[in-house]
Each structure stands twice: as structure tokens, then as C-alpha cells.
Amino acid sequence: MSNPQQLRFSKEHEWLSPAEDGVSTIGITEFAANQLGDVVYAQLPEAGDTVTAGETCGELESTKSVSDLYSPVTGEVVESNQAVVDDPSLVNTAPFEGGWLFKVRVSEEPKDLLSADEYTEFSGN
């Protein structure tokens, strides 16, 4: 498995795209999706919600368990991925493309995000 080089990663297994006009896209990594198993339900933050780096902002439910979703950045949610709410399996089949979770207008990015290589080493994959 290879993690896209342009992304940054949290130790909670979320990824963050480079900001475009101050907005970054957030999702969970392929490693996390595989660990969860088949995702059957996604509760995502909604547009207008404020998220805080390192704090929970939603949850993903799989056939194995329910896992909290953490925001890797602080900011205002500008969009949630309705396609994932309608078809949560996108998290498993396309975690870096169609399975993204939400977009945030970033007001504060933490300093402890990992590069793709650092995340690969951290996760052991």
C-alpha cells in the first residue's frame, strides 16, 4: 500500500490534502479503512460546524466496531461528502478519492502531521 505523497497524516489515521484557497479535504487512510473492516455507517460533521485539531467530530461504524473520527486541523467545515453518507463503503473502496469525508476552511494546522513516508513508518504499512 502506498500513501499519496502530497497528503499529510495524523497519528489517528486521518489524511489532509494541501489547502486550496484555504480549504483542505480530510479522510481516513487506507490502513485505517482496512483495520475497520466494511464501513456501514458514517456520521460526519456538517457545513458550518467548527472542528478542533485532535478532537472527535464524527464516527464511522463498521461490521467490526464503531470508531471516532478526529479532525487533524482546526477550522470550519465547508462541505461533508454526502456520497459517503449514502454509501459508506466508499471509505473502503476509495479512501483517497471518492471516500473523502469532509472539507475544512483551515484556521490552524497542527505541527505534528506526518509526511506520507513518516506515516508509512508509523503505521507499519
Image (tube, rainbow, N blue to C red):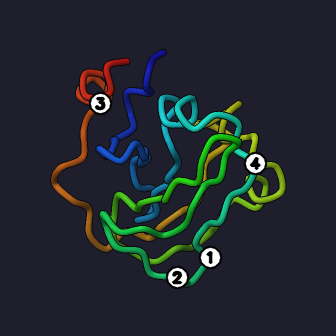
Query: Closer to the N terminus: mark 4 or mark 1?
Result: 4
| Residue at x 46% of width, y 63% of height | 23
Counting residues from the start of the chain, the first of labels 1 and 3 encountered is 1
Q: Are marks 4 and 1 in contact (CB under 8 Å)?
A: no
Quarter the C terminus occupies: top left
The mark nearer the N terminus, 3 or 4, is 4
- Which residue is label 4 attached to? 40
Read off the residue under disc 1: 46
- Relative height, residue 98 to residue 51 (above, below): above
* Whole-number angstrom distance, CA of label 3 to CA of label 4: 26 Å
Decide which of tag 2 and tag 3 comes sooner along the chain. Answer: 2
Amino acid at dot 3: Tyr
Labels 1 & 2 near each other (Cβ < 8 A): yes
Label 1 vs label 3: CA separation?
27 Å
Q: Residues within 10 Å of mark 3 (few under 14, many from 20)?
A: many
Residue 7, image quadrant: top left
Of mark 4 and mark 2, the one earlier in the sequence is 4
Q: Nearer the viewer, residue 109 or 52?
A: 52
Q: Which mark, by number, is residue 49?
A: 2
Q: Which residue is mark 3?
A: 119
The residue under the point 17% across, 49% down is: 112
